[in-house]
Image (spheres, grey):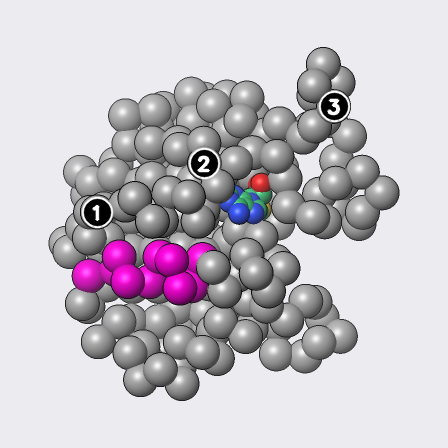
């Protein structure tokens, strides 16, 4: 376990401590093969768990998000937080929260925020990754786009983590589960660990 520089319970988000430690193990397992990258920063909770690993091992985490929120974060939806609304433009904006989190955690030299739509960046990305965390949009288009767009950038032996995998549809939406199933069925990945809604797989 890599020590957390701040109290992560104070950061808005939906990742619990057991999942956070599993993420740390996953990043550590792939870190020798290249930097790490997460899709879905929100206010920086996973970025702190993973940034602590990047700092400890002398590597880098890229944290990608358009910062306008997923579907379920929009007004009227279940996971809307009015504190994250930028009234001046009439849209969600989590970037200031991420930056504050990274500043307070002393992780600005270890986590590189990228403000981008996942698919737009994936098509231009060239650096092989040692670790990839998919925790972005939950529509089928978003989840499948993340899987198809980013897993080719994972180095052989690299580690893939997927959040919000709910085998029982009563527990939550299906797209993250669908891409997890697709990864297993592809024979490119084998499962390493499952903690709550987090799944960790290694690329062959
Ligand atoms: N990992 C975060 C939670 C991420 S929530 C934590 O630990 O707290 C999902 C995030 O994905 C949201 O902030 C949303 O803005 C972002 N997102 C959704 N679709 C996206 C897309 N297509 N490209 C980039 N970011 C996206
Ligand atoms: Mg999530």
Q: Where is residue 88 in the image (x, y as percent from the top left)?
A: 72, 14
* Foreground residue among 90 and 81: 90
Q: Which of 125 and 189 is in front in this view?
A: 125
Look at the image and tell me whether residue 48 can be seen.
no
In the rendering, at what x and y percent does residue 82 appear? Answer: 78, 30
Q: Quadrant of residue 156?
A: bottom left
Name which of mark 2 and mark 3 comes first in the sequence: 3
Q: Name the element at disc 2.
A: loop
Residue linked to disc 1: 126
Residue projecting furthest to the right: 76
Q: Which residue, given by chain and number where applicable, does mark 3 sit on? A: 90
Q: What residue do we see at 34% from left, 49% from top?
A: 123
> Mark 2 or 1 closer to N-term?
2
| Element marked by disc 1 | loop
Q: Is residue 7 magenta?
A: no
Q: Mostly what secondary structure, the magenta segment? A: helix
Q: Report crowding for label 1: few under 14, some 14 to 19, many 20 or more residues within 10 A (C-alpha).
A: few
> Which residues make up the magenta segment?
146-155
| Mark 2 CB within 8 Å of ligand 1 | yes
Going by the image, does 44 lie left or right of 192? right
**The quadrant where residue 148 appears:** bottom left
Between discs 3 and 1, the one toward the N terminus:
3
Residue matched to label 2 = 116
Camera-side residue: 198 or 152? 152
Distance CA(mark 2)–CA(mark 1): 16 Å
Q: Is mark 3 within 8 Å of ligand 1?
A: no
Alpha-carbon distance for marks 3 and 1? 34 Å
- Does 152 appear in magenta? yes
Q: Determine the quadrant in which ligand 1 lies.
A: top right
The residue carrying pointer 2 sits among few (fewer than 14), some (14 to 19) or many (20 or more) residues within 10 Å by Cα, namely: some
């Amino acid at each position: 376990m890599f020590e957390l520089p701040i109290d992560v319970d104070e950061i808005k988000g939906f990742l619990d401590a057991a999942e956070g430690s599993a993420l740390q193990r996953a990043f550590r397992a792939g870190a020798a093969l290249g930097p790490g990258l997460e899709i879905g920063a929100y206010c920086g909770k996973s970025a702190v768990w993973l940034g602590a690993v990047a700092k400890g091992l002398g590597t880098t985490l890229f944290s990608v998000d358009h910062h306008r929120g997923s579907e379920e974060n929009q007004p009227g939806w279940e996971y809307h937080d009015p504190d994250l609304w930028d009234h001046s433009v009439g849209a969600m904006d989590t970037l200031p929260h991420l930056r504050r989190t990274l500043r307070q955690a002393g992780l600005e030299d270890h986590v590189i925020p990228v403000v981008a739509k996942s698919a737009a960046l994936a098509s231009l990305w060239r650096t092989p990754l040692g670790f990839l965390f998919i925790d972005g949009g939950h529509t089928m288009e978003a989840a499948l786009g993340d899987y198809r767009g980013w897993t080719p950038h994972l180095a052989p032996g690299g580690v893939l983590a997927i959040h919000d995998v709910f085998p029982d549809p009563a527990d939550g939406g299906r797209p993250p589960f669908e891409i997890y199933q697709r990864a297993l069925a592809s024979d490119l990945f084998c499962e390493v660990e499952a903690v709550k809604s987090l799944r960790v797989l290694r690329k062959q």
